[in-house]
Amino acid sequence: MKYLHTMIRVSDPDATIRFFNLLGLEETRRMESEKGRFTLIYLAAPGDEGAEVELTHNWDPEDYGEGRNFGHIAYRVDDIYDTCQRLVDAGYTINRPPRDGHMAFVRTPDNISIELLQDGHLDPAEPWVSMPNRGHW
């Protein structure tokens, strides 16, 4: 058995791709189905193309809701503080800041929870230590 990908439905593919690009993922392939009226976009971290995220965009508008039973997608990052700062600078809210220098949560434009994990722990640093949690993660 081999892991292939995690699929999430997205309402705005360009906004979601920009979000994942900030994390360091790049588009690896794309498929459009005129008959099925959907686009599949695959993203992966360079060098880790075997672990993809599949963005499914259905061309006909749908309200997907927020299905918390999905859980989250997790990524190990090189520097959790730099990654979180890039996201904040781009206008995203860090829902669970990396106070411990190890773990943070942020949400995609479609409200999918993304867990960011530092390999090991960085020393606690501001502004992350005193930043409050922002909603559910």
Image (spheres, helix red, strand yellow):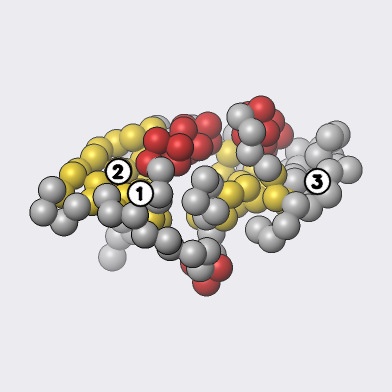
Which one is closest to the eye, mark 3 or mark 1?
1
The residue singled out by tag 2 in the image is 41
Residue 23 picture location, percent across and down: 53, 36
**Considering the image in quadrants, where does the C terminus appear?**
bottom right
Q: Which residue extends farthest bottom? A: 69
Kind of residue indicated by mark 2 = Ile
Image height check: is 59 above or below 1? above
Q: Which mark is residue 130?
A: none
Cα–Cα span, label 1 and label 2: 5 Å
The residue singled out by tag 3 in the image is 99
Counting residues from the N terminus, which is met first, the one under dot 1 or under dot 2? 2
- Tell me which residue sits at (56%, 44%) in the image: 76
Which one is closest to the eye, mark 2 or mark 3?
2
Kind of residue indicated by mark 3 = Arg
Kind of residue indicated by mark 1 = Leu
Label 3: element kind: loop
**Considering the image in quadrants, where does the N terminus appear?**
bottom left
Question: From the viewer's perspective, is 75 left or right of 2?
Answer: right
Label 1: element kind: strand
The residue singled out by tag 1 in the image is 55
